[in-house]
Amino acid sequence: MEHAVKGPVFDCRMCGQCVLHSTGMTCPMTCPKTLRNGPCGGVREDGRCEVDPSMRCVWLRAFERSRRLPWRGHFTDLRPPVDNRLAGSSSWINLLTGRDRRTPPGWQP
C-alpha cells in the first residue's frame, strides 16, 4: 500500500527510511549517487545533475520545495546513513517500530 501511494506521487524508492518530510517531499534516493544529506558538489551551472544531465539535481528541487513547507527547518537536519537492510520494507512500519532510527555501530551525529 505504501509503495502504491508514495511511488507515483514522490517517486519513492522504498528505502525503508523515509525522509520526505525533511527533503521538501523529494525522495533523495532518486539521486544517482543516492546522497541523503545534500548535493555532491558536481551540480552543473544550469542545476542539472553531473551523472545524469537530463535531470535536475534532486537536492536543488528539495531545497526549493522545502522553502514552501511549514516544517522547512528540518531541511538542514543531518540524516543517518541508509541502512540497506531496510530496502524494500515499509518505512511506515519502520517508523512505528523505531527500526528506521537505529544507526550503524560507530555512527554519531
Image (tube, rainbow, N blue to C red):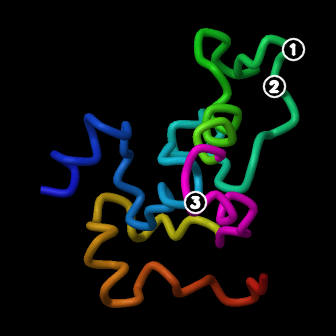
What is the chief secondary structure element of the magenta stretch? loop
Q: Residue 8's spot in the image, x, y percent?
A: 26, 34
* 59 shown above or below 21: above
Quarter of the image where the C terminus is located: bottom right
Q: Amino acid at mark 2?
A: Val
Q: Which residues are magenta?
A: 67-80
Assign a secondary structure to mark 1. loop
Residue for badge 1: 45
Q: Nearer the viewer, residue 2 or 89?
A: 2
Residue drawn at 41 percent across, 85 percent down: 99
Residue 22, numbered circle: 3
Using the image, tell me which numbered label, if any, was put on residue 78: none
| Dot 2: element | loop
Amino acid type at circle 1 is Glu
Crowd band around label 3 with a 10 angstrom C-alpha radius: few (<14), some (14–19), many (20+): many
Residue 43 bears which disc, if any? 2
Residue 108 x, y percent position in the rendering: 77, 86
* Circle 2 Cα neighbour tier, 10 Å, few/some/many (<14 / 14–19 / ≥20): some
